[in-house]
Amino acid sequence: MAVELTINDIPVSVPEGTTILDAARTINIDIPTLCYLNLHEMKLNNHIASCRVCVVEVEGRRTLAPSCSTPVTPGMVVKTDTPRAIKARRTMVELLLSDHPKSCLTCSKNLDCDLQALASDLGVRNITYEGEESRFAIDKSSKAIVRDPNKCIRCRRCETMCNEVQTVGVYSAVGRGFETVVKTAFDLPQHKTSCTFCGQCLAVCPTGALTELDQVDKVWKALNDPERFVIAETAPAVRVALGEGFGLEPGAIVTGKMVAALKRLGFDRVFDTEFAADLTIVEEATELMDRLKKGGRLPILTSCCPAWVKFFEHQFPDLLDIPSTCKSPHEMFGVIAKKYYADLMGIDPQRITVVSVMPCVAKKYEAARPELGRDPKTPDVDIVITTRELARMIREAGIHFGALPDEDFDQPLGESTGAAVIFGTTGGVIEAALRTAYEWITGRPLARIEFEEFRGMEGIKEAVIDMAGRDFRVAVTHGLGNARKILEKIQAGDSEYDAIEIMACPGGCIGGGGQPYHHGNMEILKARAAAIYREDRNKTLRKSHENPAVRTLYEKYLGEPYGEKAHMLLHTHYIERRKI
Amino acid sequence: MSQSEPGQMTQQAEIPDGGVNRQFALLDEFVASLPYKKENLIAILHRAQEIFGSLPEEVQMHIAYLLDIPAAKVYGVVSFYSFFTMKARGRHVVNVCTGTACFVRGAAKIQLEVEKQLGIKTGETTEDGLFTLESLRCVGACGLAPVLVIDGKVYGKVEVGQVKEILGEYREK
């Protein structure tokens, strides 16, 4: 049923149950918000109404109403812009600032902070309230996420994301009153919890309380060390988001400019993680065929996402034998760079520094996993930086990104197919795997190369593919809460799936924790996904097994896919971990 | 990078004390008797504190495991309510009511006297483990203000001079 009301004297008609905030948006009034965050596509709705920044006047009501959590009623008369409402909002921000470090200039969220933007928009020009400030220890214990509770404004977006969307439950509001702060259980350092390092908490944190571990200086140091041979590899999702760091439209494809920028930063070689994504598909499709042939355990689960891997290690230790044993593409890349490419070029692998540019903060943690390297001195990947960190390096170097010419990846590890591009979005890995597995299993060329049924933001997508008379059941899921539902089905023995793709971040890597901040705008994620599929269509080769450089790698170096050497270099194992 | 990775599964330490095992068994029994478990977190915490005397990490971890909820959530609730304590308490828990009526009738002086007699501050436990001193806000016996509560027994209209004697009863127990 529709409800009629007026907002700032403008008649509005909205469905029953709509909040004042959403009703105002239908007439293009954006009431300022801070703690509120409603991301329908991710099923995240944080409306605890604790910050009181969105208050408005409602006729006949003594107190101001928080518009984010007040539903409209028939005949309601709302004023969003009265002096009283405006002053109250400003006061709320001033009170928040009374217990917030005033160190914006040196904060990593400087110019990208919701609280700062609000203070600016609401005309806060004085620190009106000086009082006690919280003092908490900063947690830099993990390899991926830095937690500075002093900058926490208790909006609890991270808690909602971690507990409800991801169902990991690392955070909780602890204590009461002024002392309240969002923390881990028993104040444990982050790396001792079940944290998957997916980084979705920092993707929604409105301040600098949660950020990634900054590794830019390590990259600068390697680049300026004449002894080091520094190789960059870039994940698919980076090229459709990096442009946002320079004011380009979301979904702008900047592959060529990104390569040019990396070369100007001084990388000795600029290669593509997509090369290794094709390699991953060849290995994973062969592993699948091996399981089908030998009656191995199904479903096979993808293993490219390090946050997902850590999730099942903590939450489903009884299922450690079903994920594919394939290393993630950037790890495969690292080992190939340090073995095959080093041999090819006659470079001492100890001199090579592999820098992964990733849309992800969990990749930082993954690169530090001790089993992902042939020995402690040569990890597969040395340094991981996020899309955001690369954008900053480009700015630091004063490179005019928009004016850069398009340049090509170096060869041979820069060669890739369309199947590798789509790794960057939910559904892409399984689509890529099917393009290869279908042809190998049926021995027939694939008539329809695009699998629309696995695309889009739906939380769990399923389809049955006819593989030469055998029904092949496939599921795709993103967001760890959705993954949990599927894994519980498997645990209960109710699963008939043959293959499942799982990505930890809602939307897949395009929505990764290391991407430019979306500030709650899901259209940005959709634009990035659309760009991924455009980039796929732009490629001449669109099936991983057709990648000529990958074929050469097997012929000259690895031997058989899923063979002995491939096993040693490209596969890994998983570790049972405690749930906390 | 060769060191064993943090967060990795380690063998749970054997609990040597049969008494501790008994305490966990009591808690398990209580939780098993509840038709709804997650919904009864607070009741379970009360019972656990009754059994163990406090709610140390391992007890909270165990409750999280039993209820299949994150340990952070259990910790959040424990840290919110002042009734719950993570620190082991003494054999006798002394509470000085500092609610409005008691406060007006001199609770602060009573509190100071108890602190002096026990040689500890409010919130602390004596070294011999005999007493823990806490404060609470109103036990609903304002007519008897100021009020002192020891192990649930209420002492009304307490005067500073009586404190030593009252505590003495418990020293002998």
Image: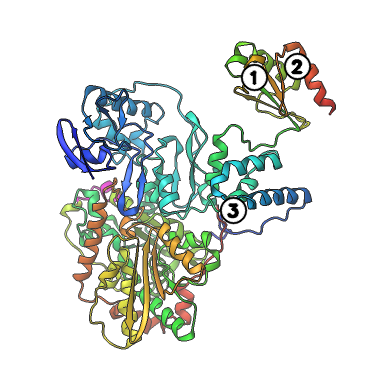
The residue tagged 1 is B141
* Residue A192 position (above or below residue A344): above
Q: Classify residue A280 by image quadrant.
A: bottom left
* Sequence-first tag of 1 and 2: 1
Q: Would you call the spot at circle 1 few (<14 residues within 10 Å), some (14-19), or many (20 or more)?
A: some
Chain of the residue that carries numbered disc 1 in the rendered image: B
Q: Secondary structure at mark 3?
A: helix
* Sequence-first tag of 3 and 1: 3
Is A56 displayed left or right of A506 in the figure?
left
Foreground of the two, A194 or A364:
A194
Q: Are marks 3 and 1 in contact (CB under 8 Å)?
A: no
Q: Residue at x 46, y 80 (%)?
A: A565
* Residue A521 position (above or below residue A125): below
Q: What segment is highlighted magenta in the picture?
A: A393-400
Name the quarter where the C terminus of chain B is drawn.
Answer: top right
The residue tagged 2 is B163
Q: Is residue A416 visible?
A: no
Mark 3 vs mark 1: same chain?
yes
Q: Secondary structure at mark 1?
A: loop
Where in the figure is residue A556, as x and y percent of width and height?
37, 83
User: Disc 2 marks which amino acid?
Assistant: Val
